[in-house]
Image: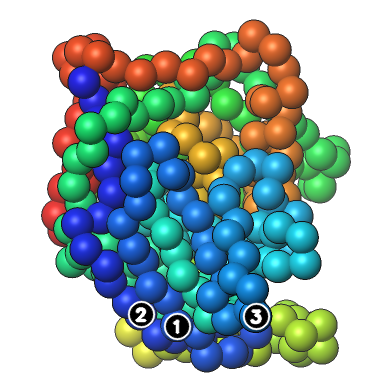
Amino acid sequence: MLQQRTLKTLTRAVGVGLHSGQRVELTLRPAAPDTGIVFRRVDLAQPVDIAVSAEAVTDTRMASTISKGGAKVFTVEHLMSACAGLGLDNLYVDITAEEVPILDGSASSFVFLLQSAGVVLQNAPRRFVRVLQPVEVREGEGDNLKWARLDPYHGFKASFEIDFAHRVVDATGQRYEFDLGTDNYTRDIARARTFGFTKDVEMLRANGLGLGAGLDNAVVMDDYRVLNADGLRYDDELVKHKILDAMGDLYLLGRPLLAAYSAFRSGHAMNNKLLRQLLAQPGSHEVVSFDDDKRAPTGFLQPARAW
């Protein structure tokens, strides 16, 4: 039986929110089988649990936000991506503010935290959403076209193409494909940082966003170059970060996908729209588990490899 996974012990981190600039403490705790991933706002007078689901996503401007009632947690995608890459099914995320800390701007710090706590198997079958027929969402035309798509695939892979019409971005790799069965998430994807442009800083801060951003937690570019002293971590770091984000956004479904995801200029909003379209189409998917490990996709057989 392909089993569910949780943490062996709890682990903690302290940081600031990318957009809020607010100090936040995060505690990641083991959870029982079939709990799923649950964010708990422990700073509220009455703590509120927000279980991840496609329907729990209530805002996708600059980040993915999940809510329940008046309580919300935003910028969840990097932590969710780490959970997807490591194959974690059940986890409590205690948080003392409304935004997940950005840490170094990638998922690698979360991967380190989770692997340090240890990943353990649980006596319950891991359940997947298997895509049975193509599902696609599209917006715009010509230079404004963007789309995202899921196709049937025995495993999980993601391909992404970016197009920013910016000389710095144009000099990097703009298309990348990652396959969970043959590639290594912690090595190939997790270290890719969020990125932004100096020309957008004033607009973001005028809207109360990007208040915690800096060269220590983001790739920052002006019109001519990358401003970070150490440059890029990968030649194609920008498109790899879009795959990192997409894996986190898709894991908000609440179960791992068996599918091939492909996208052009997609973002948090379109990724959530794609999940909702999948759920709205009868016959497009089914929930499956694997009593025989030999029938499961190779990328899901073992807890994620180390660095």
Q: Quadrant of the C terminus?
A: bottom left
Which residue does the numbered mark 2 point to in the structure image?
Answer: 13
Q: Residue furthest front?
A: 46
What residue sits 63% from the left and 79% below the top? 44
Q: CA distance from mark 1 to mark 3?
A: 16 Å
Q: Does residue 276 show up?
A: yes
Which residue does the numbered mark 3 point to in the structure image?
Answer: 45
Question: Closer to the observer: label 2 or label 3?
Answer: 3
Q: CA distance from mark 2 to mark 3?
A: 22 Å
Is residue 147 shown left or right of residue 17? Answer: right
User: Does label 2 or label 1 sit earlier along the sequence?
Assistant: 2
Q: Residue furthest top?
A: 283
Could you tell me the amino acid type at mark 3? Ala
Q: Residues within 10 Å of mark 1 (few under 14, many from 20)?
A: some
Is residue 298 shown left or right of residue 43? Answer: left
Callout 2 touching callout 3 (CB < 8 Å): no
Could you tell me the amino acid type at mark 2? Ala
Which residue does the numbered mark 1 point to in the structure image?
Answer: 25
Q: Which quarter of the figure has residue 275?
A: top right
User: Does label 2 or label 3 sit earlier along the sequence?
Assistant: 2
Q: Secondary structure at mark 3?
A: loop
What residue sits 57% from the left and 49% below the top? 52
Compared to residue 164, the image places residue 199 above or below, namely: below
Q: How far from the left and from the top, in percent, is residue 97? A: 58, 80
Compared to residue 139, the image places residue 108 above or below, namely: below
Q: Residues within 10 Å of mark 2 (few under 14, many from 20)?
A: some
Callout 2 touching callout 1 (CB < 8 Å): yes
Compared to residue 35, the image places residue 189 above or below, namely: below
